[in-house]
Image: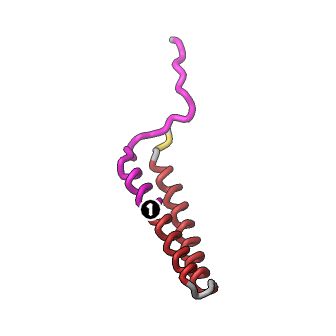
């Protein structure tokens, strides 16, 4: 039996990667993009999408039963 909270740890590691790439992307969009309204709009749309995905996933994660376990191999009952 494997505890299901292992999936939560994997998800948190994935979220760290998302945050690193988000800050990297926003920095480069604002620093090296042309100073136009289009750059700001694209940045706001990107941040809105990332925030929405994080909010929805957080809401769904809060509803999960993290005390459950996953059974990978079926248990076999040997005859007596």
Camera-side residue of 15 and 27: 27
* Residue 59 picture location, percent across and down: 38, 54
Q: Is residue 67 left or right of residue 33?
A: left
* Residue 70 picture location, percent across and down: 49, 38
| Count of numbered labels shown in the rendering | 1
Camera-side residue of 45 and 2: 45
Is 21 located above or below residue 13 in the figure? below
Task: Please tell me which residue is depicted at 50% across the width and 42% down the height of the picture.
Answer: 2
Query: Given the current orientation, which residue lies at the most extreme top position?
Result: 80
Check residue 34 for magenta coloring: no
Q: Is residue 63 left or right of residue 50?
A: left
Task: Please tell me which residue is depicted at 44% across the width and 55% down the height of the picture.
Answer: 57
State the residue position of label 1. 52
Where residue 23 sits, quadrant-wise, is bottom right
Is 75 located above or below residue 31 in the figure? above
Is 43 located above or below residue 61 in the figure? below
* Residue 36 picture location, percent across and down: 57, 85
* Residue 42 picture location, percent across and down: 55, 74
Camera-side residue of 74 and 57: 57
Task: Please tell me which residue is depicted at 46% across the width and 45% down the height of the picture.
Answer: 4
Query: Given the current orientation, which residue lies at the most extreme front position?
Result: 37
Camera-side residue of 41 and 74: 41
Task: Please tell me which residue is depicted at 38% across the width and 46% down the height of the picture.
Answer: 64
Is 37 located above or below residue 65 in the figure? below
Q: Tell me the element at label 1.
A: helix
Check residue 70 for magenta coloring: yes
Neighbourhood count class around disc 1 (C-alpha, 10 Å): few under 14, some 14–19, many 20 upward: few
Which region of the structure is painted magenta?
A: 53-79
- The way the protein has been coloured in the rendering is secondary structure
């Amino acid at each position: 039996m494997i505890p299901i909270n292992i999936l939560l740890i994997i998800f948190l590691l994935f979220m760290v990667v998302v945050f690193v790439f988000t800050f990297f992307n926003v920095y480069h969009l604002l620093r090296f993009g042309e100073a136009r309204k289009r750059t700001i709009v694209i940045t706001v749309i990107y941040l809105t999408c990332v925030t929405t995905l994080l909010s929805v996933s957080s809401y769904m994660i809060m509803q999960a039963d993290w005390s459950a376990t996953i059974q990978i191999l079926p248990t076999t009952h040997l005859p007596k």
